[in-house]
Amino acid sequence: MTEQFRARGASVEVLRAEAHDERETVIMERARRGEDPWDFMTELPTVDELVVWTLRAAAIERDGGRLPSPARHYRLLRQIALDYPDLTPTVWRMIDVVS
């Protein structure tokens, strides 16, 4: 099951770089619309949260697009933490928020 979660074979560093670029794009677009970054920065997910959501989405897509039950969601996040140890603190924080 480990390889199932490897998005395009990318390392966590590559996934973080992609997530960082995506987050910066969102910030730039919202600022261009006149929003004050001080007002929305705390609403945005962190880079690592974006990586976890991307890995979760890839797993759901591989499962035919079926949304996971709460138990499956928990197992998906735990597997991401096992596959990407650097993301473990973020995964557990996200599990605590969802629970």
Image (tube, rainbow, N blue to C red):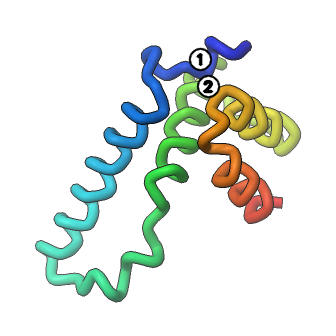
In this view, the residue farthest toward the right is 71
Q: Give the labeled residue for mark 1.
A: 62
SS for dot 2: helix
Circles 1, 2 touching at the beta carbon (< 8 Å) = yes
Mark carried by residue 59 = 2
Which corner quadrant holds the N terminus? top right
Percent x, y for residue 13? 42, 35
Q: Amino acid at mark 2?
A: Ala
Against 83, residue 54 (above or below) is below
Q: Nearer the viewer, residue 37 or 73?
A: 37
Based on the displayed image, in which of its 4 quarters is residue 17 positioned?
Answer: top left
Tell me the CA gap for discs 1 and 2: 5 Å
Against 82, residue 8 (above or below) is above
Report the residue at 33% width, 39% height from top: 18
* Left or right of 71, for residue 44: left
Q: Nearer the viewer, residue 54 or 12?
A: 12
